[in-house]
């Protein structure tokens, strides 16, 4: 079995693959203060609850958006799982070509998403990843990572709205009935949910306009469900896209 780990700024995605089948997934909070042993306790409990023995996870692969946690999880996997993790970084075979001015600038999570999207769809794809940041990644049908865009995440924007103005306060992040808010709560909900929907629709339209062919638009990330129900521009949702990418990259680099 493969233990796949995606370390984001806000949460850590964990998945167990049995061959190509993703058997279990979990999300835990990212905490830069925790040690390898701290995370190991959490991981052991999750695996035990799922009926998986530590020894069953014979391989591990990970990407990280938090540099300080790479060594923490490397230690965890070597010490507690006796596994040498494959880490998505420069020099790793991915099966896609990065056409950015500086390929080393592309985040490992975005590469993992691109690898999975190309494998799943075999056509031009725009990936909209709604996590701590909202990223838009464009992958050609030939498997080329062409670039994209980065915007503040939905929660970052919402928190700025909740904390900066003196007279505003936190509200549930759900869509109101109408765009025209008739009270402070519905007005803030409209601005956050419908405003971000408009951002996604506008950016996708601009990206599509720069491509020679129509691209499939795929959503992923923790906040994707909030926007998915408000627009038709998102054609598919793959919540485990980056974990699938880890599985593919791991297989590519461990062959033979």
Image (spheres, helix red, strand yellow):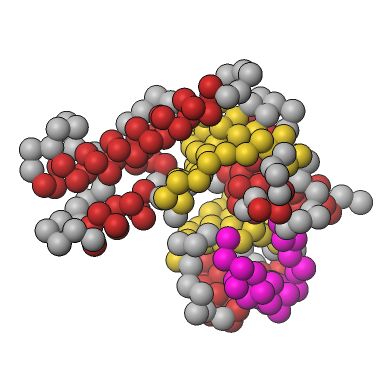
Q: Position of residue 198 (x, y in %)?
A: 34, 32
Q: How many marks?
A: 0
Residue 88 in view (yes/no): yes
Q: Residue shown at 19%/32% (left/top)?
A: 179
Residue at image coords 51%, 74%: 32
Residue stretch in magenta: 65-88
Please state which of residues 16 and 228 is positioned toward the viewer in this rendering: 228
Q: Would you say 187 lies left or right of 97 here?
A: left
Residue at (53% x, 54% y) in the render: 25
Q: Is residue 31 left or right of residue 94?
A: left
In the shown orientation, is residue 170 left or right of residue 60?
Answer: left
Where is residue 129? Give x, y as percent.
50, 44
| Quarter the N terminus occupies | bottom right
Residue found farthest to the front: 101
Q: Going by the picture, which residue comes out furthest to the left?
A: 182
Query: Residue 131 or 237: which is nearer the viewer?
Result: 131
Q: What is the residue that sits farthest to the right in this orientation?
A: 256
Rendered position, 213 above or below 137: above
Q: Is residue 76 magenta?
A: yes
**Residue 217 lies in the magenta-colored region:** no
For residue 50, say whether it is visible: no
Horizontal and vertical percent position of residue 49: 51, 65
Depicted 66 relative to depicted 37: above or below? above
Q: Nearer the viewer, residue 210 or 170?
A: 210
- Residue 137 occupies quadrant: top right
- Residue in view at x 91 percent, y 51 percent: 256
Residue 97 x, y percent position in the rendering = 76, 39
Left or right: 202, with 195 as reference point:
right
């Amino acid at each position: 079995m493969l233990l796949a780990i995606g370390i984001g700024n806000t949460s850590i995605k964990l998945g167990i693959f049995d061959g190509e089948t993703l058997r279990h997934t979990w999300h835990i909070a990212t905490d830069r203060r925790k040690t390898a042993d701290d995370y190991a306790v959490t991981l052991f409990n999750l695996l035990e609850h799922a009926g998986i023995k530590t020894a069953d996870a014979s391989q591990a692969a990970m990407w990280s958006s938090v540099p300080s946690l790479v060594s923490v999880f490397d230690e965890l996997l070597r010490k507690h799982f006796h596994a040498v993790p494959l880490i998505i970084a420069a020099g790793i075979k991915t099966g896609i070509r990065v056409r950015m001015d500086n390929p080393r600038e592309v985040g490992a999570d975005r590469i993992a998403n691109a690898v999975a999207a190309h494998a799943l769809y075999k056509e031009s794809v725009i990936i909209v990843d709604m996590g701590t940041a909202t990223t838009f990644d464009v992958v050609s049908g030939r498997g080329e990572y062409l670039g994209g865009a980065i915007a503040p995440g939905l929660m970052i924007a919402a928190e700025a709205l909740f904390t900066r103005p003196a007279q505003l306060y936190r509200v549930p992040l759900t869509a109101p009935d109408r765009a025209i808010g008739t009270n402070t709560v519905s007005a803030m909900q409209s601005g956050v949910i419908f405003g971000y929907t408009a951002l996604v629709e506008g950016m996708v339209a601009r990206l599509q306009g720069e491509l020679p062919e129509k691209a499939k638009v795929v959503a992923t990330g923790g906040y994707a469900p909030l926007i998915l129900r408000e627009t038709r521009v998102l054609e598919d949702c793959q919540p485990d896209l980056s974990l699938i990418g880890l599985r593919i990259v791991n297989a590519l680099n461990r062959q033979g």
